[in-house]
């Protein structure tokens, strides 16, 4: 008997993202998933602004962290999950515009620890501007949902 290939090998990545209440609050969507990579997008909304009118840095970090975690999850075996154990966020410019995009890619996938980067961009009138870079360390969790 031969195994039937999974019609959508990244379904559990999408399902995991969709279960995050905070991402739903931000109206964030997973727009691309591949082996070791992930892209998440959200509209920039005044409700998530800070005192100067820019998108709050915590929101930029949250979307970047989630994209990074799901990029790492895409390489995990069935029954495993990931949890961030460390990250650093560098901000290049204020986040203003129509949308925020976080594009994450696994730098190194290990058995217990993986390193991932996530580049954050804002989009205004179709033009992307880099606003932040997150470097994260993710821990593999066995037998986790």
Image: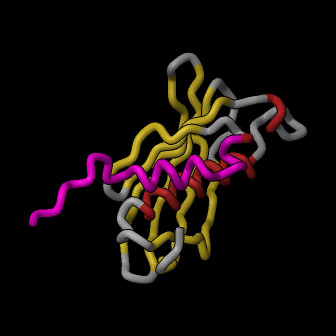
Q: Residue at x 52, y 70 (%)?
A: 82
- Foreground pick, 75 / 59: 75
Residue 26 within the segment the image draws in magenta:
no
Residue 9 within the segment the image draws in magenta:
yes
Residue extending farthest to the top is 125
Residue extending farthest to the left is 1
On screen, 53 above or below 77? above
On screen, 139 above or below 133? below
Residue extending farthest to the front is 1
Hey, which quadrant is residue 32 in on the image? Answer: top left
**Percent x, y for residue 88?**
62, 65
Q: Residue at x 38, y 65 (%)?
A: 107
Q: Is residue 137 visible?
A: no
Q: Is residue 28 visible?
A: yes
**Percent x, y for residue 14?**
47, 48
**Percent x, y for residue 76?**
38, 69
Residue extending farthest to the bottom is 112
Q: Residue at x 52, y 42 (%)?
A: 40
How many discs mark residues in the rendered view? 0
- Coloring scheme used: secondary structure
- Position of the N terminus, as image quadrant, is bottom left
Bounds of the magenta span?
1-24
- Foreground pick, 76 / 92: 76
Q: Residue at x 43, y 72 (%)?
A: 79
Left or right of residue 73: residue 61:
right
On screen, 113 above or below 132? below
**Percent x, y for residue 102?**
53, 45
Hey, which quadrant is residue 124 in on the image? Answer: top right
């Amino acid at each position: 008997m031969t195994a039937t290939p999974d019609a959508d090998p990244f379904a559990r990545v999408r399902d995991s993202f969709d279960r995050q209440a905070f991402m739903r609050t931000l109206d964030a969507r997973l727009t691309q998933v591949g082996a070791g990579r992930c892209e998440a997008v959200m509209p920039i909304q005044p409700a998530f602004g800070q005192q100067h009118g820019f998108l709050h840095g915590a929101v930029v970090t949250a979307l970047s962290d989630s994209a990074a975690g799901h990029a790492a999850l895409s390489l995990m075996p069935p029954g495993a999950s990931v949890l961030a154990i460390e990250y650093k966020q560098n901000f290049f410019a204020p986040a203003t515009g129509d949308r925020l995009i976080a594009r994450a890619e696994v730098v190194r996938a290990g058995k217990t620890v993986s390193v991932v980067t996530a580049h954050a961009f804002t989009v205004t009138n179709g033009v992307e501007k880099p606003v932040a870079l997150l470097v994260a360390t993710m821990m593999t969790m066995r037998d986790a949902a």
